[in-house]
């Protein structure tokens, strides 16, 4: 699969997902390794208040979990890993 095929399939799946666009951005940012609220807000270009709201929503729904309330660090929770697994579930079988 070419990179452009991968990107198009992934973006199509992401667009069809039932999360809000802001929640999707935050979830993907956490999945990409951003842990701290400030970094997530900066990299997603979301206002701090919007980022906080989305982080709380994703935490309540079990998609992410806070590993450090003091520094506001987050990681994927099992539900978030499952959602991402579904978003990436478009790989074609390898050719023999």
Image: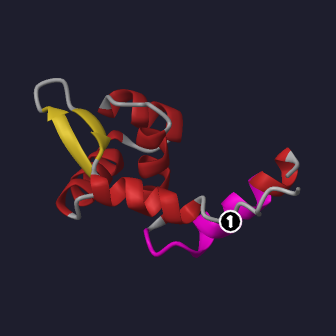
Task: Report if residue 35 lies within the magenta region.
Answer: no
Task: Report if residue 17 lies within the magenta region.
Answer: yes
Which segment is the magenta one?
7-19
Q: Is residue 47 left or right of residue 66?
A: right
Crowdedness near tag 1: few (<14), some (14–19) or many (≥20) residues, C-alpha within 10 Å: few
Query: Which residue occupies 45% across, 42% down?
Result: 31
Name the spot of residue 84 as percent of width and height, x first.
48, 57
Query: Which residue occupies 77% across, 53% down?
Result: 6
Q: Residue furthest left?
A: 70
Query: Which residue occupies 41% across, 37% down?
Result: 41
Name the spot of residue 8 as percent of width and height, x first.
78, 60
Q: Nearer the viewer, residue 72 or 81?
A: 81
Residue at mark 1: 90
Q: Main secondary structure of the magenta part?
A: helix
Name the spot of residue 12 as percent of width and height, x first.
69, 68
Name the spot of residue 87 as percent of width and height, x first.
56, 63
Residue 36 against residue 91 in the figure, above or below: above
Q: Is residue 95 left or right of residue 40?
A: right
């Amino acid at each position: 699969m070419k990179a452009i095929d991968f990107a198009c399939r992934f973006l199509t799946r992401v667009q069809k997902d039932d999360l809000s666009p802001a929640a999707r951005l935050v979830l993907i940012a956490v999945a990409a390794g951003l842990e701290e609220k400030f970094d997530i807000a900066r990299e997603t270009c979301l206002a701090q208040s919007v980022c906080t709201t989305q982080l709380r929503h994703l935490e309540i729904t079990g998609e992410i979990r806070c590993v450090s309330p003091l520094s506001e660090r987050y990681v994927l929770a099992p539900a978030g890993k499952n959602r991402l697994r579904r978003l990436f579930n478009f790989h074609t079988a390898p050719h023999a």
